[in-house]
Every structure is written in C-alpha cells, then in structure tokens.
Image (spheres, coloured by chain):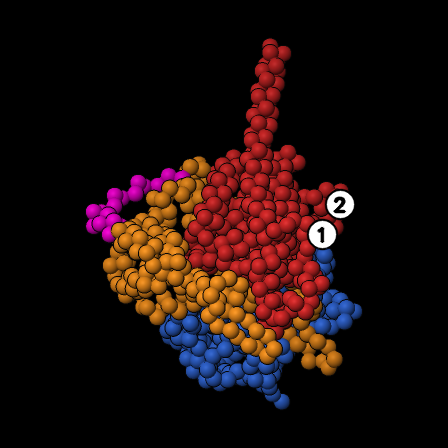
Chain colours: A orange, B red, C blue
Amino acid sequence: MHIHFLDPYRSGDSLIHRLDPRVKFVLALAFILTCALTPAGAWPVYVLLFATILAIEILSTLGVGYVLKRAILAFPFVLAALPIIFTTPGAVWLELGIGSWELTISLPGLVRFLSIALKSWLSVQAAIVLAASTPFPELLVAMRAVRIPRLLVAIFGLMWRYLFVLADEALRLNRARAARSGNSGQPGIKAGGDLAWRARVTGGMAGNLFLRAFERSDRIYLAMVSRGYDGEVRSLPLPAITSANWLVLLAGLVILGVLLSLSFLFGS
Amino acid sequence: MHIPDGFLSVAVSVFLWIVSIVVVGYALKRVGKDLGERQVPMMGVLAAAIFAGQMLNFAVAGGTSGHLMGAALASILLGPWAAVLVLTSVVSIQALIFQDGGLLALGANIFNMGIVGVAVAYMAYHTLRKLAGGRKWGLYLGGFIAAWLSIEVAALSVALQLALSNTSPANLAIPAMAGVHALIGVGEGLITVGALAFLSTARRDLVEAGEAGPIKGSLVWVAGLLIALVLAIASPLASARPDGLERIAGQLGFLDAARSSRSQIIPDYAFPGVSNTALATILAGMIGVLIVFGVALAVGYARRSVRRSERRSERRDHQVSSK
Amino acid sequence: MHHSIEIEHLSYSYPDGHLALQDVSLSIKPGEKVALVGPNGAGKSTLILHLNGILSGEGSVCVCGLEVSPATLGRVRAMVGLIFQSPDDQLFSPTVFDDVAFGPLYQGLPPGEVAARVEEALGAVHMSAYARRVSHHLSMGEKKRIAIATVLSMKPEVLVLDEPTAGLDPRSRRSLIRLLGELPLTMLAATHDMRMVRELFPRMVILDEGRVAADGPTGVLMEDVALLEAHGLERT
C-alpha cells in the first residue's frame, strides 16, 4: 500500500512543464512578491494578475479546476484577517445589527480584508502550478540555481526520497493501532481510554517511527560511504539556460513589473 | 501555524527571511562540524520522520484530532542546531510541495517553528533537567513543558507578526492564538512525553546524547530565554491596543455604560498612549533579540577560538616537555 | 450459529483507480483454518484490511454475525484480531507488557483484568518471561510472537494473519508454525509459505488479480499443478 497521493506532481507535456525549472521557480516567486507589493484595493491589477495566472494554468494543462480546488486549502486562514473589517477606522460601509448588538463594517477595512484574501489566493495558485508542473528533482535544481546551499539541497533530496517510505510506516502504525482499538461490548465500560493515555500512545508511535528512521539513516550513511561519499556534495554542473527560457524569464518579469507599477496608480 | 502568502507585510517577511537565512546558515556549518559526513543522511531521514510523524494522530473530541509539530522532540533528541535544520527542511518542503504555508512567508514560518520553537524548547528542557538534577521526572516534565512552550511561544510569534503586518488586530489575534494553542500545546506535550518514554526504554543513549554541554548550548539557551521573555512581555502590551477593542466596545454600547470596568476589558498599563508604545516595545524586543543573538554568537566564537588556541598551546607545551 | 467470516460480492478500488478486488465471496466457519494464497498484488492484503473495517468497499463483509460498518467498528475490532506483516509497525509501546496491554486497556477493562489477559496472552505464545523487555530489541521471531500476543489479549474470535512466516529463519519459522497449530481460534492467513499451508491449513483459497480463482481442500488443490502455476504458485 503506497501513498501516491502525497506527490503533487502531475506529469504532462505542456509549455509550462517544459520550461526550465529555474525560470519557473523565479517567476513563481516574482509573482508572489508582486502580489505582496501590490497595494490594497488595486482591483484592476488583481484582475490582471488573476488573468495572468489563469492563462498559465490553462497553458499548463493541469486543469483549472484542479488548481482552484487545491487553492481552497489556504482559505481557512482568511478568518484570521476577518476582524479587521470591523476594527479598521474609516468610512462606514455597513452597519450590522445582530440582536441588540451593532457592528460597523468600515470601507477601508473591507477593502483591506478582500485584498488580503485575493492576494493570498493568487499567491497560492502560483505555488500550486509550480509544484504540480515540476518534478521534485527539478525543483532541487532550481534551488541550487538560486544559491541555496548545496548541503541543504542535499538534505531536502534525501528527505524527499524517504518521505514516502516513512509516511507508509506512519500509516501502518495508525492501522495497527486501529486494529487493536476494539469495543468489548460489556455494558458500563467505555472504550477509548482517556485523552492523556491516547496522546502518550501516539507519542510512543512517534518515538518508534523516529527510532527506526534514525537507525535507517545509519544504514543509508553506510551505503553512501561505501560508494565513496565523503561529506561533500558533488553534482554535475547545471546545464545552461536556453535563450528561449531567458526570454520567458525576461518577459515574465517585465509583465509583473508593469502590473506592479500600474497598481500604484490604483491603490489606496 | 503555517502562515500562507498574502498575510504578512513585505517588510516583516523580508526581515524574518534575513534572520532565518543567518540562523540556518550557521546551523549548517555547526551541524556539519558536529556530524561530519553523517549530516546529510541523518538530517534528511529524520526530517522525513518528523514529517511522517505529523501524520500520526489521536482522537481529541468530536472528530477533531491532535498531532505532533516536533520542534521540541527534535530539539531534545538532536540538539538545537540539528533541530533547526530538520524543522527547516520539514517546513520548507511543506510550503513548496504542499502549499502548507506560503513561499514569501516561508522565512517567517521557518523562524516561528524552526527557530523560536526550537530555541524555547531547548531552553525549557535543559533548565528543567538541571533543576531535577538527573532524576527521571526532569525528563518528562522538561519534555512536556518544552513542547508546550514551543507551540505557545511560536503561536505568539505568529500573532505578533500578523499584528505588525496590520492583518489582524493585536488585541484579538494574540489572545486567540495564545488561547487555542495553549490547548494544542498540551497535546504536543503529551505526545512528546510519550515519545521520550518510548525512547528512554528502547534507546536511552539517544535521549542522553541530545544533551549538549553547558558551554556548547549556552547561546541557544540565552536566545531561547530572551525570545520567550520578549514575546511573553510584548504580547499583552500589544494586546492592549485600545483602538480595535475600544471601537467594538463603543459600538456595542459597553463603553459608556461601563466606563469603570473598561480597565478590565483593556488591561491598564502604565504607559500613556499605549498603542504606539506597545508597537515600539515589540520592535525593540525583536531588535534586542537580534543584538543578543549577535553578541552571543560573537562570544561563542571568541570562546571557541580562545579554547582552540589554549589547546594548541597545550599541545605545544606537551611537545616541548616530551622532547 | 453464525459464520466467523462472511464476505459477499466484495469489490474495492484504490483511490488511484486500481481495481484491487473484484466480486470476492468467501465464508469461513468457526474453527476453520483457511490459507489465502496468490501472487503479489493479488489483493490478499487488501482483502484482509476489509475484515476489520480499515478499508471498506462495495458488497458486504460480516464478521461473527455482525456487519462491518462505521457503527460496528469497535465491536468488530474486538472480535477480529489482525496481525500485520511487519511486527515493527505493531509494537509501538515502550515495553512488551504495554503493547500486549494496549488492546484491553483501550477497551476500558479494569486493571486487574488487563494484567490477567496480558499474562494469558504471553503464556499462549510462550513468552511469559518477556513482559518487561523492550520490544525494539527483540529478534524478528520474538517480535512476531509478541505481535500475536498483542492481539490474543483482546480474546478475539478470529485471527487473521498477513504473511506470518515472512522473514523468519528456519528455527523461528518452525516454532511459529507450532504455535499457530496450538491456537484454537478460527484462522485466516495470507501467505506464500506453501509448506506451512500444507501443514496447518486444511482449506485453501487462491486469489489472483482480485478474484477468487479457487476455493477448496488444500490436499486437492495442491495436486492441481496447472492451476497452481496459472496463478503464480508452486507445488510443494
């Protein structure tokens, strides 16, 4: 029983899939940065940004529905920003009466809240397209190109390799516990144990997982050493970025720059 | 606790990125020195274990479940710097691959879970173990409190960052985060204790190995204490911003009817013009932490180079005398 | 008198679309010992996971007269003891005693009863002296026995095993087979170990590509070399 669903990469042959991962990585970050820098209330620019990411989603053949569905995951956090519609001072937009309570929603507060929600939604779409259109090994290449230390990238790589193995073990631990979680059926006796006991049992499972991982890492180390590993991470030099990709990178950055400049005209 | 993109201001995001890069960079060097070639396989696989460990859950009530974050456990078993690397890996992959936390906000998330969580847990654990003088209860109480604090203080950190970014009013975000995570922290504490109990019987040596000597760990200990103090003091101050709560109170008609009890809704601090001062205090606190970090780092380096040169001169003396 | 296990027209597809079980029907009477054999990927483990409700597919699964459904999971798990292939995934408590006690403790039984059950279960697997040992340090054979004990302490009616002899050296295998022979419970074991099947399991069910290819007396089926080879099995 394998946990396939953990890997978000969906293979395909679209233009987006074929882009150099370094370019995709930088553009995704640039898009998110542009969203962050765009002031609140610059609605036309938000629409343009959405059009941009939507175009990319369509080009990627990942399925707009798929991307938008995954984007909902970040939504619950929006509640954290909800209070500012009441607490930001400014022109009154709506007065709510709930029973004997009266709450005032201010216009600047509403603008700010919607801007945050939109920016967050746009950013997460960019991240989803990046992860779904780029196999993980290529993302590691992108990280190296952006000057993330080679040692850290190597750690990420190994983590990824063993993530699924260990996630499988965690799943089996959960199942083994479920298999022994029965109900005696005797009247007056409640099954389940108390909360503290359940938490401690879970801790035991975590300790078990951790210990096996630790000992496994030892075996992996020995295997690496047997193949000549000496602590230094050596890899083949990265291939040059093709001119087509440079063009895409440039075009992308220019578009984002233009959108950002526009936003300062509209923003509050 | 993973903050998505769009909720933190660019200034806060960039600031925390810089802090995280500095700390993680140092952690890489430190762990490289301590573990040598074992660094990559060990950190990688253990990061996978923490990630997978977060999938283990236990039923709380009405369909909700609790599970592990892991900063305290990693810190206790691996020492603070390795724990920083492990948690950084977990949080980074969660953001990049699973969109659990944003990419621009990743610096903040690494800071909150991988640095604050680890430092505070380390400080609490070692303090309690020293207090217990090696007796068993030190392990379990230390583990519990370290885990609880790692969650609670990280949550405070998140709340302050949201407040500084003007995304959430401080006097709602801070109590809300602190309150909810006080409960979540209990779950983390219990799981951590359970894990330590298992490991104590199965591999006692691993549990003991995480104990760094007093000098090696003091930088982190001091940082952990300061972070906890700063956040503990800054949070109620920030919470005391009267603007938000007062507006609502006024609208709800409470303000006039109960002027005398306003001091109960909004704690009264001695500072006049509390809101601005509160913000200034938080900023000062964070800058202060950085300064202390920097000083402690410098002191740590100085101590090590002093010891190194002492050892070198010792060896020279030995060579001279043995001739 | 109800059947211990009654599976009717069970079908199951994994989330990724792979059809693991197709219209499987199987009944096992109380006290019967049945071996489930077939090549890797046949669906043996998948079928087993339906018996205590970890997976649920189309069709019906009844255990000891009780239909397996979300409402009955608690009772089902008390009546069907599932032992997985890797003991490391099942021994998650600090000591052997804790692991064997988990089942009864979860059920909320009083401490005296729990201790009695642990003693009985460890005795049944001939590991009474191991109560205070650390599971992690035991050998594979010892861990497999303890894993059986963790389930016996719940006093199930049916024992279901996934590859019980996998990974064991000849001596441990021999003693495990002897142990399984001693237990009076209804038993279903998924296995590749054809020699053990001959010894312990009078009835054999061949599963291949999610379907029941054959279901009959072991002695008879074992002589049908063509049938065995057609489903990736060897005559022993």
Q: Which type of secondary structure does the marked residue at label 1 adopt?
A: helix
**Residue B112 seen in render:** yes
Identity of the amino acid at label 1?
Answer: Leu
The quadrant holding residue C187 is bottom right
The span from disc 2 to disc 1 (Cα, nearest Å) is 9 Å
Q: Are marks 2 and 1 on the same chain?
A: yes
- The residue labelled by disc 2 is B132
Q: Is residue A77 left or right of residue A27?
A: right
Instruction: Give residue B206's position: percent from left, percent from top.
Output: 62, 45
Towards the viewer: C4 or A11: A11
The residue at the point 62 percent across, 46 percent down is: B230
Residue at label 1? B141
Q: Which residues are magenta?
A: A233-252
Q: Chain of mark 1?
A: B
Callout 2–callout 1 Cβ contact below 8 Å: yes
Answer whether residue A245 is magenta in the image: yes
C196 up-or-down from C186: above or below = above
Q: Residue furthest left?
A: A243
Residue at 60% across / 11% down in the picture?
B320
Answer with the quarter of the image where residue A48 lies: bottom left
